Image (spheres, rainbow, N blue to C red):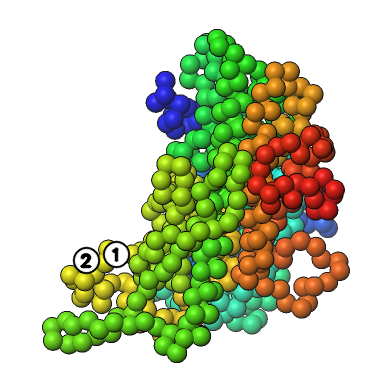
C-alpha cells in the first residue's frame, strides 16, 4: 500500500489522466465551431449574402472540408500532447542573460520550435485549402492555359503559418507558458474558459497583425529564395505579379487571410493549453483519513509531503486552504480524534507538514541574509586592508604561481534554546574553504545547526549552473529544492595534488571569458535574481499560512477536544520567525527590483514585474495570518512562551501597530 501511495501510479490513473483527457476532448469539441467561424470570415461577401452563405456551407460540410478540419484537429491534438509532456509547476528563475539564451537554445527547445514550425506550416496549408481559390493550390495555369505559374498566394500563406508556429514556440519557451499557474480566486471551469476565449481572440488578433507586418518585411527581403527553389524543382514560371514587390504586397485580401490564419492557429493552440491548465488546477478534495473500503486512496497529510509528483503537493495545499476557509464538515475530521487511542493524528500530521514547510523557508531566508551580510563585511575588509587579497605561493613544475585564498566564514542561526525560545541571532561556525561559482559570487549551501547535528538549509539536488533550478520543474521530477548558494567546491587535498585540474576546469574558462566585455555582459547576474529564486515556490507557503491561521481561528469555536491548543505556540513562533525573516530580506540591497523614476506614480500599486507578485503576496499573507490569530485569541496569547523579540512583535500586533 505504501508503494501505491508514494508512486505516481495513483495520481496518473485516478486524477491526472482523466483531467487531461477531458481538456483534450473539449479542445477538439470546440475546434469545428472555430473552424466554421474562420471559413465564414474568409468567405465574407456582404454584397451577396446568399452566395456567401452557400459557399460557406459547401466548403465547411464537404468531404474535403471535413478532411482538412480533421487534419487541423490532429495537429492541435499533437501540440496539446506536447504541452502535457513538458508542463511544470514552479518556473525557472534565470540568473543572467546567458541562462536566458540557453533556456531558448536548448536542444529540446529547438526541437520544440522545429515541430511547431512544421505544424504551423501544415495548418496554414489546410486553412489555405479551406479558403479556396486562388489560395488552394501551389501552381496555377496562365490565362491561355498553356503555362503553369507558381501560385505565390499559397506559398505566402504556408510560409506565414510556419513563421507563426515558430513565433508561438519561441513565446512558449521564453515566457515559460508551460508553467501551471494556480488562480488566486477559484471559479468554475466554464467561467474561466469563457473569460479566456474573449481575451484570447482580442490578444491574438493584435499579435497576429503585428507579426504579419514583420513577415511582410521578411518576405520582401528573402522571399525570392524559396520561390526560386520551387521554380527550379517544379519547372514552373514566375507569377506575373510577384509578391516580393511593392505592388504584389499591396493585396488587402491576402493580408486579411494571413492575419486570420495566424489568429486561428494561435487561438486553437492557446485554448488547448488553457484548458489543460484549468482542468488540472481545479480543487481536488483529498481524504482526511484513509477508509478501509478504498486502500488505494491517498490521504491529505500524505499528499502534503509528496516528493515524487509536485502537482500533487500543490493540489494538496490548495485543498487544505479551501478546507480551512469553507469546509466545515471536513474541518470536523481534522479536529477529530483517531480511534483507537483517541490521538489527534489528523491535525498533528497536517500541522507538522505545514510547520516544516514554513520553517524551511525561514531557514532559507535567514541563511541568505547571513550570506549577504558576510559578503558585505568581506568587501568592507578588502577596502580597508592595504592588501585586499591574501595570496600564497605555489610551486608547480619549477614555476611559481600565486593562488588566492578564498576562505569564507559562514554564519548560521544559533541552535534553539528551548521549544519556544527560538531566536534569529546568529553565531559563527567553522570556516569552510571554497571557490567562487561560475556565474556569480554565490558561495556554497549554508549549514544550520539543528538538534540532530549540522544540516544544509536546502536539500541538495542536481541543478544547472546556468539558471536557478526550482523544485517541480517537470512532471517526473522530485520536489527537492537545489540550494540558492551553489556548491561547486572541490576538496583542498585534491586541488593540491592535481593543481592542473583547476586550470582546465570550466570555472577557469568562464573566468577568462568573463573578463571580456561580451562575457561580462552575458554572465553578470541580475540584481534581483537570487531574491526571485528564493520566492519561486512560495505559493505552497501562502496556502500553508492561510490554512493554519484559518484552522486556528475556527478551532476557537469548533475544536471540542482542544487538539489545536498544543501546537498553537509552535504555529505562532514559526509565523513570527517567518515574518521577521521576510522583513529583513526586503531591507537587503538586492531584494527589491530596481524602479525607474517613471514607475513611482500615485496610480500604480504593487510590484512592477509579474514574477514579484509571490513575494509580496507572501509578505501580506504572513501579516494577515498573524492578525487573524491575534484577533481570535486576543490577550490570551501573552501567556505563550517565546523569545523576547517575538514577544515584542506579538504585542505590536495586538496593539495594531503592524
Q: Is residue 136 above or below residue 9?
A: below
Cβ atoms at labels 1 and 2 below 8 Å apart: yes
Q: Is residue 468 above or below residue 26?
A: below
**Residue at x 51%, y 69% (from the top left corner):** 374
**Residue at x 62%, y 26% (from the top left corner):** 347
Q: Secondary structure at mark 1?
A: loop
- In the rendered image, residue 556, in percent from the top left (x then y), is placed at 78, 27
Q: Nearer the viewer, residue 483 or 577?
A: 577
Kindly identify which numbered label has been placed on residue 10: none
**Residue at x 62%, y 16% (from the top left corner):** 337
Mark 1, other Cα within 10 Å: few <14 / some 14–19 / many ≥20 = few
- In the rendered image, residue 521, in percent from the top left (x then y), is placed at 49, 80
- In the rendered image, residue 485, in percent from the top left (x then y), is placed at 46, 61
Q: Secondary structure at mark 2?
A: helix
Kindly identify which numbered label has been placed on residue 490: 1
Q: Is residue 500 above or below residue 625?
A: below
Q: Nearer the viewer, residue 85 or 642?
A: 642
Lateral position of residue 338 relative to residue 40, left or right: left
Q: Is residue 117 above or below residue 146?
A: above
Task: Note whether residue 439 is visible.
Answer: yes
Task: Note whether residue 125 is visible.
Answer: no
Question: Quarter of the image containing the N terminus?
Answer: top left
- In the rendered image, residue 554, in percent from the top left (x then y), is placed at 76, 28
Mark 2, other Cα within 10 Å: few <14 / some 14–19 / many ≥20 = few
The residue carrying mark 2 is: 494
Q: Nearer the viewer, residue 349 or 213?
A: 349
CA gap between label 1 and label 2 equals 7 Å
**Residue at x 24%, y 70% (from the top left corner):** 495
Amino acid at each position: 500500500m505504501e508503494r501505491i501511495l508514494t508512486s505516481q501510479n495513483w495520481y496518473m490513473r485516478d486524477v491526472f489522466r482523466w483531467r487531461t483527457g477531458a481538456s483534450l476532448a473539449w479542445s477538439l469539441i470546440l475546434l469545428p465551431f472555430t473552424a466554421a467561424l474562420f471559413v465564414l470570415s474568409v468567405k465574407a461577401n456582404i454584397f451577396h449574402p446568399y452566395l456567401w452563405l452557400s459557399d460557406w456551407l459547401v466548403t465547411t460540410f464537404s468531404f474535403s472540408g471535413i478532411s482538412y478540419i480533421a487534419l487541423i484537429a490532429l495537429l492541435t491534438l499533437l501540440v496539446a500532447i506536447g504541452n502535457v509532456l513538458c508542463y511544470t509547476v514552479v518556473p525557472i528563475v534565470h540568473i543572467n542573460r546567458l541562462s536566458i539564451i540557453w533556456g531558448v537554445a536548448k536542444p529540446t527547445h529547438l526541437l520544440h520550435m522545429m515541430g511547431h514550425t512544421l505544424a504551423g506550416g501544415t495548418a496554414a496549408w489546410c486553412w489555405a485549402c479551406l479558403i479556396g481559390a486562388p489560395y488552394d493550390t501551389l501552381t496555377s495555369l496562365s490565362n491561355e492555359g498553356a503555362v503553369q505559374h507558381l501560385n505565390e498566394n499559397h506559398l505566402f500563406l504556408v510560409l506565414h503559418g510556419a513563421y507563426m508556429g515558430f513565433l508561438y514556440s519561441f513565446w512558449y519557451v521564453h515566457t515559460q507558458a508551460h508553467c501551471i499557474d494556480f488562480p488566486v480566486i477559484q471559479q468554475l471551469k466554464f467561467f474561466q474558459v469563457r473569460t479566456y476565449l474573449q481575451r484570447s481572440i482580442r490578444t491574438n488578433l493584435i499579435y497576429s497583425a503585428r507579426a504579419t507586418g514583420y513577415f511582410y518585411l521578411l518576405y520582401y527581403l528573402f522571399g525570392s529564395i524559396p520561390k526560386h527553389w520551387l521554380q527550379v524543382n517544379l519547372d514552373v514560371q514566375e507569377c506575373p505579379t510577384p509578391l516580393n514587390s511593392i505592388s504584389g504586397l499591396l493585396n488587402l485580401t491576402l493580408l486579411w487571410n494571413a492575419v486570420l490564419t495566424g489568429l486561428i492557429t494561435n487561438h486553437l493552440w492557446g485554448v488547448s493549453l488553457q484548458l489543460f491548465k484549468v482542468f488540472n488546477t481545479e480543487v481536488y478534495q483529498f481524504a482526511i483519513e484513509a477508509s478501509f473500503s478504498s486502500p488505494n486512496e491517498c490521504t491529505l497529510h500524505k499528499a502534503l509531503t509528496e516528493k515524487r509528483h509536485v502537482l500533487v503537493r500543490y493540489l494538496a495545499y490548495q485543498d487544505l486552504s479551501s478546507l480551512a476557509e469553507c469546509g466545515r464538515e471536513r474541518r470536523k475530521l481534522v479536529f477529530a480524534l483517531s480511534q483507537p487511542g483517541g490521538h489527534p493524528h489528523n491535525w498533528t500530521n497536517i500541522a507538522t507538514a505545514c510547520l516544516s514547510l514554513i520553517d524551511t523557508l525561514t531557514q532559507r531566508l535567514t541563511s541568505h541574509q547571513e550570506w549577504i551580510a558576510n559578503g558585505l563585511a568581506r568587501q568592507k575588509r578588502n577596502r580597508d586592508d592595504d592588501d585586499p587579497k591574501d595570496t600564497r605561493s605555489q610551486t608547480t613544475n619549477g614555476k611559481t604561481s600565486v593562488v588566492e585564498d578564498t576562505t569564507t566564514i559562514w554564519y548560521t542561526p544559533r541552535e534553539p534554546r528551548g521549544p519556544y525560545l527560538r531566536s534569529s541571532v546568529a553565531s559563527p561556525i567553522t570556516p569552510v574553504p571554497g571557490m567562487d561559482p561560475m556565474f556569480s559570487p554565490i558561495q556554497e549551501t549554508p549549514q544550520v545547526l539543528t538538534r540532530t547535528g549540522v544540516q544544509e538549509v536546502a536539500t541538495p539536488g542536481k541543478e544547472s549552473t546556468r539558471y536557478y533550478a526550482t523544485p517541480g520543474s517537470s512532471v517526473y521530477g522530485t520536489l527537492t529544492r537545489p540550494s540558492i548558494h551553489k556548491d561547486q567546491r572541490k576538496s583542498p587535498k585534491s586541488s593540491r595534488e592535481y593543481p592542473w585540474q583547476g586550470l582546465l576546469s570550466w570555472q577557469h574558462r568562464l573566468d577568462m571569458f568573463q573578463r571580456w566585455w561580451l562575457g561580462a555582459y552575458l554572465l553578470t547576474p541580475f540584481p534581483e535574481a537570487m531574491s526571485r529564486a528564493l520566492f519561486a515556490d512560495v505559493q505552497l507557503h501562502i496556502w500553508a499560512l492561510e490554512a493554519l491561521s484559518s484552522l486556528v481561528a475556527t478551532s476557537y469555536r469548533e475544536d471540542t477536544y482542544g487538539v489545536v491548543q498544543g501546537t498553537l505556540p509552535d504555529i505562532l513562533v514559526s509565523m513570527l520567525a517567518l515574518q521577521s525573516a521576510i522583513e529583513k530580506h526586503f531591507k537587503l540591497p538586492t531584494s527589491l527590483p530596481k524602479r525607474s523614476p517613471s514607475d513611482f506614480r500615485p496610480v500604480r500599486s504593487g510590484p512592477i514585474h509579474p514574477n514579484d507578485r509571490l513575494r509580496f503576496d507572501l509578505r501580506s499573507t504572513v501579516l494577515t495570518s498573524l492578525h487573524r490569530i491575534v484577533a481570535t485569541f486576543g490577550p490570551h496569547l501573552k501567556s505563550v512562551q517565546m523569545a523576547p523579540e517575538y514577544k515584542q512583535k506579538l504585542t505590536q500586533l495586538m496593539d495594531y501597530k503592524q
